[in-house]
Amino acid sequence: EVQLADSGGGLVQPGGSLRLSCAASGFTFSMYAMSWVRQAPGKGLEWVTSIGSGGGGSFSYADPVKGRFTISRDNAKNTLYLQMSSLKPEDAAVYYCARYSYYSGSVYLGYWGQGTQVTVSS
């Protein structure tokens, strides 16, 4: 079955960097667009960034992370990455990787990882 395993979270000081990883299995990874979504304490889910399938040449970022976060993928390793730089306290959240699914004319995030905690504090 489809499985997504998030990892790489931890404690970082403001201004620091961290790289998250998401190991995918159970499907042809290169054929699917992927996304990162986060949830801060006491708040709802917030879409962060997405990357297209195949060569990964298409990207989208939420305004709060533009210029600081970079999404990438290694299709040979079935792995999705999120490189986070210049981290701010407001970036602290549980980060989830997710896979896009397609049904008729609809596009949605059909599969999610378990989440990895990112804490930004001095």
Image (cartoon, rainbow, N blue to C red):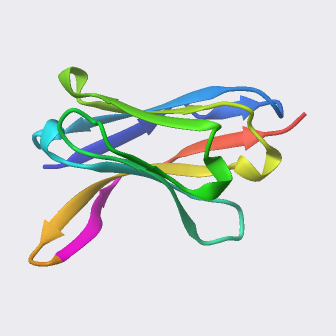
What is the span of residues highlighted in magenta in the rendered image?
A: 106-113
Can you give x and y, in whole percent of width and height, for residue 53 in the image?
A: 21, 43
Q: How many marks?
A: 0
Outermost residue, bottom side: 105
- Name the residue located 23 percent from the left edge and 29 percent from the top edge: 78
Outermost residue, top side: 76
Indicate the quadrant containing the C terminus: top left, top right, bottom left or bottom right. top right
Can you give x and y, in whole percent of width and height, for residue 70 in the image?
A: 51, 35
The reply to whether residue 113 is visible in this rendering is no
- In the rendered image, residue 112 lying in the magenta stretch gets the answer yes
Chief SS of the magenta region: strand
Nearer the observer, 114 or 52? 52
- In the rendered image, residue 94 lying in the magenta stretch gets the answer no
- Name the residue located 19 percent from the left edge and 21 percent from the top edge: 76
- Name the residue located 59 percent from the left edge and 51 percent from the top edge: 94
The reply to whether residue 45 is visible in this rendering is yes
- Name the residue located 65 percent from the left edge and 37 percent from the top edge: 68
